[in-house]
Image (cartoon, grey):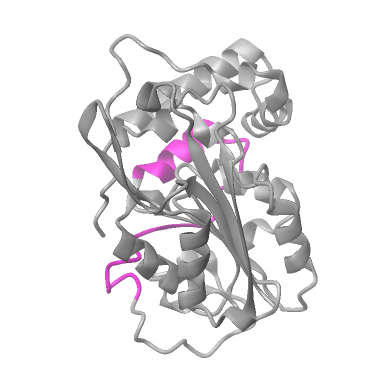
């Protein structure tokens, strides 16, 4: 796996705004109060800020600096409700919700609160410390969720040439040794703020691997959000030569998935939106608008 995203650090002395002070994120505030057991606003703020500092030390990227791990990227995704409804219509023994790039697991914990079985969600990331920091963030009040640490691009973690194993009715997600057992088992795969970390070829390879994990049942969906662009290609910042990443346009993103799947077997939805006010990506882009690609690929 080769991460190509390179971005400058925030200006010295700058601090991000704490997002849960924003009244529009009241549902997020209430979620963290209920799952941490901390009802006092200021005490909760201190607790979350302390965790944010620890996360940023390990992964100094804008999404962490910006407190995106508390914003509910899954449940607040514009296509989330439709994705969930499609999954509810399936009649299978086990519906598995996988979140790649799960960080400390806050998004999946909201999915559980929203009604998904705790034993049927799976957080996946490459940094072992996320498990401990997730447990620290949510304190002992919260029950742990299944978490797998590993790089899907490494053959010992996922072998795309290996045929799927015989399916049992239920998979124990707490005891996975690799991701091969997940082939054809995932009802929903979410990938937020992930694809833009990689070059064009690895983005396509990641999409192919997700397709192998996705259930063949109609309504099974891969969805997420990441940096987008009006024109696909390498994006650079004029003031920082080291800052670059590969961004897809709506058209190129749809074309990628049409290569991965038979187009007649999936519904592909993609739309571009400007970053919301207050997300503070301005330190990277100045006054340039920041575009985010929201998308979903659903079996029909």
Q: Dividing the picture into quarters, in which one does residue 269 lie?
A: bottom right
Q: Is residue 167 above or below residue 149?
A: below
Residue plotted at (52% across, 26% down): 279
Q: Viewer-proximal residue, 245 or 70? A: 245
Q: Which residues are magenta?
A: 129-158
Q: Extreme left residue here?
A: 241
Q: Is residue 16 above or below residue 242?
A: above
Q: Is residue 151 above or below residue 73?
A: below
Q: Dividing the picture into quarters, in which one does residue 266 lie?
A: bottom right
Q: x%, y% of residue 125?
A: 40, 53
Instruction: Give the left or right position of residue 35, taking residue 8 as reference.
Output: right
Q: Extreme front residue here?
A: 231
Q: Viewer-proximal residue, 213 or 286? A: 286
Q: x%, y% of residue 28?
A: 67, 31
* Magenta highlight on residue 134: yes
Residue plotted at (34% across, 86% down): 161
Q: Viewer-proximal residue, 11 or 249? A: 249
Q: x%, y% of residue 103?
A: 45, 44
Q: Dividing the picture into quarters, in which one does residue 159 lie?
A: bottom left
* Magenta highlight on residue 28: no
Q: x%, y% of residue 60?
A: 31, 32
Q: Viewer-proximal residue, 100 or 182? A: 100
Quadrant assignment for the C terminus: bottom right
Q: Is residue 17 above or below residue 120?
A: above
Q: Can the viewer see residue 121 in this picture?
A: no
Instruction: Give the left or right position of residue 105, taking residue 24 as reference.
Output: left
Instruction: Give the left or right position of residue 37, taking residue 54 as reference.
Output: right
Residue plotted at (44% across, 21% down): 287
Residue plotted at (35% across, 73% down): 158
């Amino acid at each position: 796996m080769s991460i190509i995203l390179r971005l400058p650090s925030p200006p010295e002395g700058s601090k991000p705004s704490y997002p849960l002070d924003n009244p529009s994120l009241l549902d997020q505030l209430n979620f963290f109060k209920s799952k941490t057991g901390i009802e006092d606003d200021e005490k909760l703020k201190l607790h979350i800020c302390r965790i944010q500092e620890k996360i940023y030390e390990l992964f100094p990227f804008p999404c962490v600096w910006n407190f995106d791990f508390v914003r509910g990227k899954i449940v607040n995704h514009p296509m989330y409700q439709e994705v969930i409804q499609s999954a509810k219509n399936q009649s299978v023994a086990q519906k598995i919700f996988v979140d790649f790039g799960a960080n400390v697991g806050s998004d999946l914990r909201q999915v559980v609160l929203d009604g998904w079985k705790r034993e049927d969600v799976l957080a996946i990331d490459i940094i072992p410390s996320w498990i401990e920091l997730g447990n620290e963030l949510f304190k002992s009040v919260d029950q742990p969720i299944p978490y797998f640490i590993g790089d899907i691009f490494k053959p010992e973690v996922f072998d795309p040439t290996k045929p799927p194993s015989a399916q049992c009715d239920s998979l124990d997600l707490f005891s996975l040794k690799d991701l091969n057992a997940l082939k054809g088992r995932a009802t929903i795969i979410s990938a937020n703020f992930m694809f833009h970390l990689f070059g064009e070829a690895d983005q396509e390879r990641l999409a192919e691997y997700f397709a192998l994990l996705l259930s063949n049942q109609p309504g099974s969906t891969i969805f997420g959000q990441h940096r987008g662009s009006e024109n696909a290609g390498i994006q650079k910042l004029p003031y920082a030569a080291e800052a670059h990443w590969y961004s897809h346009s709506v058209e190129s993103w749809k074309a990628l998935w049409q290569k991965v799947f038979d187009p007649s077997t999936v519904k592909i939805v993609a739309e571009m939106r400007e970053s919301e006010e207050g997300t503070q990506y301005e330190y990277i882009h100045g006054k340039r608008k920041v575009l985010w690609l929201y998308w979903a690929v659903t079996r029909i």
